[in-house]
Amino acid sequence: MTEPAELPGAGVREAGGDAPVREEKNPIFAAGLSLLFPGLGQVYNGETGRGILVLFGVLAGLLVMLIPGAIVWIFSVYDALATARRMNEGTVPFRKMRFVSAVLFMVVWMAGVLAFLTLLAFAAVAAFTRAM
């Protein structure tokens, strides 16, 4: 009988003897999630609140100026990678990702991006009407 396939990024460290089995985070997967969707790597690491802060930091930074948003975005990738590694080492408490948190985060992410694009469109219209 074959073993069930694991989700990408979800790992289990094999323990010898009677030692308990300990789960692991995949740092590269966490960083990739934050690269694609700012803050989702933090949600994967079980830090939903931090992920939402990262998302709004990136959107606010991109709205004000491009550079601050990009800096927060790059930091979120590094933070997700480093936190997953620290969880695997045991220096940071391991937190499980809750599926509901990930789904709700993606809803917030889409709403945030939609609001960002709406504000950007209003700013473009206002600049265009002033120019005329």
Image (spheres, rainbow, N blue to C red):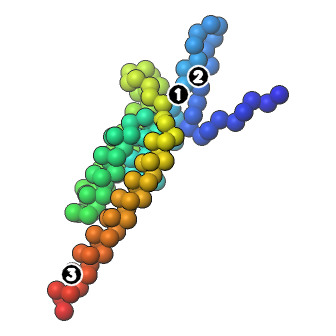
Callout 3 crowding tier (Cα within 10 Å): few <14, some 14–19, many ≥20: few
Q: Nearer the viewer, residue 82 or 109?
A: 109
Q: Which residue is mark 1?
A: 24
Are the two marked residues, 2 and 1, in contact with CB atoms closer than 8 angstroms?
yes
- Note whether residue 13 is visible: yes
Give the Cα separation between the discs numbered 3 and 1: 50 Å
Residue at 26%, 81% (x, y): give it: 125
Residue reaching furthest to the right: 1
Callout 2 crowding tier (Cα within 10 Å): few <14, some 14–19, many ≥20: few
Residue at 65%, 35% (x, y): give it: 6
Residue 43 in the image: state x and y as whole percent: 43, 41
Residue 84 in the image: state x and y as whole percent: 44, 33
Type of amino acid at the residue the image marks with label 2: Arg
Give the Cα separation between the discs numbered 3 and 2: 56 Å
Question: SS at mark 3?
Answer: helix
Give the Cα separation between the discs numbered 2 and 1: 6 Å
Left or right: residue 24 compared with residue 90:
right
Type of amino acid at the residue the image marks with label 3: Ala
- Which comes before the other along the chain, label 3 or label 1? 1
Type of amino acid at the residue the image marks with label 1: Glu
The quadrant of the image that shows the N terminus is top right
Q: Which residue is mark 3?
A: 127
- Give the number of marks: 3
Residue at 62%, 38% (x, y): give it: 7
Residue at 40%, 55% (x, y): give it: 109
Q: Which residue is mark 2?
A: 13
Q: Quadrant of residue 85?
A: top left
Residue 117 in the image: state x and y as whole percent: 34, 69
